[in-house]
Image (cartoon, rainbow, N blue to C red):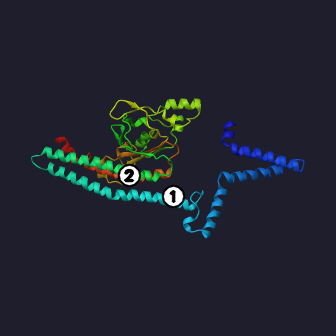
C-alpha cells in the first residue's frame, strides 16, 4: 500500500483535493452532499491533471503560436526554439545530427583510401625485399619499422580527428562532454588503444571484470548502462575500478549518493604515468553512464575465404563472437541518463567506419603472411 501511494501520490492527492473542494462547495450551496457532483468534480480534476501531466496543454498552445506566427513573422522567426514541442526545433535538431554524420563520413571518405594506399605501398616494399636472394635483413627491418610506425602514427591522428567529430555531435547536451576511448582485447584483457587523456596507467581489466566488455564480447552487441549507481545497487553492473560492495552498503544506509564528489570516493586509485604513485581518478573518469559499441564485421555478409583469413565466425555461430571484434568504441559520461537510443544507432555508424582502419592495419601486419615472415627473420 505504501509503495502504491508513493508511485501514485499525485493522483491520490488530486482525488483528496477534489473531494474536499466538492464537499465544501455542495455544503455551502445546498446544505447537503451530492454524490453525482463529487463524481463529476473528480473526473474533471483528473482530466485537468492528465492534460498537465502529459503537457498536452503546452502542446496545443505551441501549435497555436506557430500557426499565428506563420502569418505574422518571417519563416526564420517562426516558433522560437525554446518552445516545447516545436516542430521546427525538431527539424533543426535532426538537421544538426545529419550535418555531424555527413562531416564524419566525408572526413573519413578521403582518409580511408589514403591510409590503405600508403600502407599497401609500404607493405609492397617488404614483399619485394622478401623475394630477393640473398635477403637484406637490415633493409627488411627498416621497411617493417616504417610500416608499423606509419600505422601507429596515422591511427593516432585518425582517433584525434574522429574524437573531435564525435564530441561535436554531443555539444550542448550537457556542460560536460563525454569521454571517447578506443579499446581492444589482448589475451583475455581489455587494453586502451587511444583515450582522451592518459591520466593513468592501471592494470588492464579482464573481460569478466567489467559488465560492459563482458556483454559485448559475449553477445557481440552494444552495451548501454545509463545509471551505473542504480545498476550496482541491483547487482546488475560490475567494474573492477569501482568498489561495488561499498556502494551497495552506502545505499543501504543512506539511500542515495548525494553528489558527484561523493561518487568519486567509491572509485579505486589509479597509478600515475611513469610512477608507482597512486592518484585519485578525475571527476570525468568517474562516469555514471556508459555506451560501448563493438567494431565488428560479425553480422555482415562475408565470403568464406575472407572469414577464414580474418578468423571471423559465421553469423549463425553463437561461439567465439569475440574473434570478429576488432575493438571497442567506448563512450562514458559523468552524469546519469546521458545517452539514448539514437546515440546507439549513430554509435554503430562511427564504430563501423573506424573499424575499416583497424581491418586495413591488420591486413598489412598481423594478418599478413609476408609481414609475419619478415618479422620472424629480423
Location of residue 345 in the rendering, given as x and y in whole percent from the top left corner = 46, 53
Q: Residue at x 76, y 45 (%)?
A: 17
Q: Residue at x 65, y 57 (%)?
A: 58
Residue at image mark 1: 93
**Of residues 362 and 297, the one drawn nearer to the viewer in this rendering:** 362
**Residue 34 in view here:** no
Location of residue 218 in the rendering, given as x and y in whole percent from the top left corner = 41, 41
**Of residues 2 and 197, the one drawn nearer to the viewer in this rendering:** 197
Q: Is residue 103 above or below residue 19?
A: below
Number of marks drawn: 2
Q: Secondary structure at mark 2?
A: helix
Location of residue 80 in the rendering, given as x and y in whole percent from the top left corner = 58, 60
State which quarter of the image contains the C terminus: top left
Residue at image mark 2: 162
Q: Is residue 39 left or right of residue 304?
A: right
| Figure quadrant of residue 202 | top left
**Of residues 293 and 17, the one drawn nearer to the viewer in this rendering:** 17
Q: Is residue 319 above or below residue 79?
A: above
Location of residue 346 in the rendering, given as x and y in whole percent from the top left corner = 45, 53
3D distance between C-alphas at marks 1 and 2: 21 Å
Q: Secondary structure at mark 1?
A: helix
Q: Is residue 267 above or below residue 43?
A: above
Q: Residue at x 29, y 50 (%)?
A: 154
Amino acid at each position: 500500500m505504501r509503495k502504491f501511494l508513493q508511485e501514485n501520490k499525485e493522483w491520490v492527492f488530486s482525488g483528496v483535493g477534489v473531494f474536499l473542494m466538492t464537499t465544501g462547495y455542495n455544503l455551502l450551496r445546498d446544505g447537503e452532499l451530492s454524490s453525482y457532483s463529487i463524481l463529476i468534480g473528480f473526473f474533471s480534476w483528473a482530466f485537468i491533471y492528465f492534460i498537465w501531466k502529459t503537457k498536452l496543454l503546452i502542446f496545443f498552445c505551441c501549435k497555436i503560436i506557430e500557426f499565428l506566427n506563420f502569418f505574422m513573422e518571417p519563416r526564420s522567426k517562426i516558433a522560437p526554439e525554446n518552445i516545447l514541442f516545436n516542430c521546427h526545433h525538431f527539424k533543426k535538431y535532426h538537421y544538426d545530427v545529419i550535418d555531424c554524420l555527413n562531416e564524419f563520413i566525408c572526413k573519413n571518405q578521403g582518409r580511408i583510401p589514403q591510409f590503405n594506399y600508403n600502407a599497401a605501398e609500404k607493405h609492397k616494399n617488404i614483399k619485394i625485399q622478401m623475394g630477393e636472394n640473398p635477403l637484406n635483413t637490415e633493409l627488411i627491418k627498416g621497411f617493417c619499422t616504417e610500416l608499423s610506425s606509419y600505422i601507429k602514427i596515422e591511427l593516432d591522428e585518425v582517433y584525434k580527428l574522429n574524437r573531435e567529430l564525435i564530441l561535436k555531435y554531443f555539444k550542448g547536451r550537457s556542460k560536460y562532454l563525454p569521454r571517447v576511448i578506443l579499446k581492444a582485447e589482448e589475451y583475455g584483457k581489455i587494453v586502451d588503444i587511444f583515450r582522451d587523456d592518459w591520466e593513468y596507467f592501471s592494470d588492464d581489466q579482464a573481460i569478466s571484470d567489467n559488465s560492459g566488455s563482458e556483454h559485448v564480447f559475449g553477445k557481440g552487441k552494444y552495451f548501454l548502462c545509463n545509471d551505473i549507481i542504480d545498476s550496482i545497487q541491483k547487482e546488475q553492473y560490475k567494474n573492477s575500478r569501482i568498489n561495488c560492495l561499498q556502494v551497495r552498503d552506502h545505499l543501504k544506509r543512506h539511500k542515495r549518493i548525494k553528489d558527484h564528489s561523493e561518487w568519486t570516493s567509491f572509485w579505486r586509485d589509479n597509478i600515475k604515468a611513469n610512477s608507482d604513485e597512486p592518484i585519485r581518478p578525475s571527476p570525468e573518469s568517474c562516469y555514471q553512464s556508459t555506451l560501448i559499441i563493438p567494431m565488428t564485421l560479425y553480422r555482415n555478409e562475408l565470403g568464406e575465404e575472407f572469414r577464414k583469413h580474418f578468423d571471423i565466425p559465421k553469423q549463425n555461430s553463437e561461439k567465439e563472437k569475440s574473434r570478429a571484434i576488432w575493438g571497442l568504441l567506448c563512450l562514458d559520461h559523468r552524469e546519469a541518463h546521458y545517452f539514448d537510443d539514437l546515440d546507439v544507432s549513430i554509435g554503430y555508424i562511427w564504430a563501423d567506419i573506424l573499424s575499416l582502419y583497424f581491418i586495413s592495419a591488420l591486413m598489412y601486419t598481423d594478418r599478413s603472411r609476408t609481414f609475419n615472415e619478415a618479422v620472424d627473420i629480423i
